[in-house]
Image: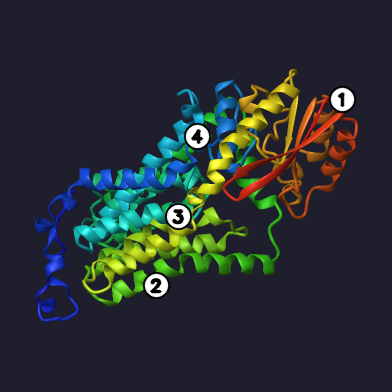
Amino acid sequence: MQDRPPAVHSADVDRPDVDRAAIAAPRAAGERSRPWFQFACLLGFAALIRCPAFGEWNYAIDDQYFALVGKRLLAGDRLYVDIWDRKTPLLYLVYAAAATLGNQTLAYQAFATVCAALGGYATARLARLFAPPGAALMAGLAYVTLLSRFGGDNGEAAVFYNPLMAAGALAVVTSLERLRQGFVPWRVTGGMLAAGTAVAFKQSAAFEACFLGAASAWMVLASRRPDGQTLARVAGLALAGATPLLAIAAWYWRSGHFAELRQAVVESNLLRIYPPPGERLRRIAALVGMIGLPLVLAMLGRRRGATDARPWAFVALWGGVALAAVLAYPNLYLHYALPLACPLAALCAPFFARPDIGRLGFAAMLAVNLWLCDTLALADRLKARPAAEALVSYVAQETPSRKLLVFGMPSYLYALLDAKPPSVLAFPPHLFDGAEAGATGHDEVKAMQRILASRPSTVVLQQPLPAAPVNLATVRQLHRYVRSCRRARTMQVYDHDGAVALRIYSRCG
């Protein structure tokens, strides 16, 4: 879609709150409106704020486990059968592809950086529907900043699927008139396919994908009396959105492991224990505080009335659905806010376009959120690589048999030492976190008994374990086992939260 200025209606001509120069500015904006320039700015900015963690394999507990699963898939393991986690498969396939490129950590971090820039570009394209080019580019930069602030400064799932969801939203919002007339442009069908592909990265994306599909279907069905052709168009949208998951389900059905797929991606999320109401309210309050500034700027920008109402309203509705989905989760972590980054940043664009304080608001958005970005905690980043190298060197020296058990983090040690995880439950919290007890479809106590019966020669134990409550049955087994180990050493590594103490027991069994 070519950049073009939003329409200026005759009723707006005499309104003092309408910035007529900003609305009519695309040609004068020059380079800022060109796609290549916007993407180059966004990619450079994303690389700048993310690069302090480049090559740091221990940066986040989730990302390094995704990388381990990718390695194991290349070694022949089957997801959910030989190595277990609960997200949908496409995320792990991305990490498997990164593992074929040499330095897996740098490969997935580089791809995540490109995806961050793509998400920023999609945000700018959305914002351009109701704001001038300069403000739209600011919205894209705000997206990249919010992505890092919300815990997406490395390789979380939403970093990869946000651009797909934004592409789906852009396809719908630029086709509102055609949908109201009962037509379904090919780009909307493609948008539904993109949104469905996002769900193949993480199930929670289904809320936004269903909203985009339902909104499109409603507009088509409301256009006139439904007939066979109209219903066929709506069915085509549904099929496009469902295709990625249908393909995954068909593959597992054909391989005889559909039950494992269902248990992992559906049942395990229903069986795990979630925080009590008090803890949940505390996390919700923290989330609201995080999104407070962009939310205020979005509302102030809308009050100026200098935007085309329909695209802005649709993006606002999408953002509301994304926020409601996050608040509806029984559990809440920082990175669960990542799907909010695109709609929030796009909605701020009209405020950024204000000639009085727009740039000040943009500067405040960047300053506040960059100040809190984990990648820019440079003191920790400088210490992280040497500490991680020392850990790998020591554990490798103490584990010539490669019989290793990681209990806590970092799970990627298995990949670095070319050690096969001793259980299908290779993500350590699935063994020690009390909230996971009974949710994995595997008996954690028996799994721990089998692991210790294999006599791992080295145990890497995080102190304290990051869980409350812990699974006492498995933790007590481990504590009894490490009493027989003939050597113990405490080492310190650094992740995105800072220092982490590890107790390495070796010459065990």
Q: Please rate how many residues cluster around mark 1, counting C-alpha atoms within 10 Å: few if below 14, some from 14 to 19, many from 20.
A: some
The mark nearer the N terminus, 4 or 2, is: 4
Label 2 vs label 1: CA separation?
59 Å
* Nearer to me, 450 or 293: 293
Which label sits on residue 296? 2
The mark nearer the N terminus, 4 or 3, is: 4
Circles 3 and 2, Cβ within 8 Å, touching? The answer is: no
- Amino acid type indicated by mark 4: Gly
Q: Check disc 3 and report its element: helix, strand or loop.
A: helix
Of circles 4 and 2, the one toward us is 4
The residue at 32%/44% (across/down) is 44
- Amino acid type indicated by mark 2: Val
The mark nearer the N terminus, 1 or 3, is: 3
- Amino acid type indicated by mark 3: Pro
* Nearer to me, 382 or 431: 382
Quadrant location of the C terminus?
top right
Of circles 4 and 3, the one toward us is 4
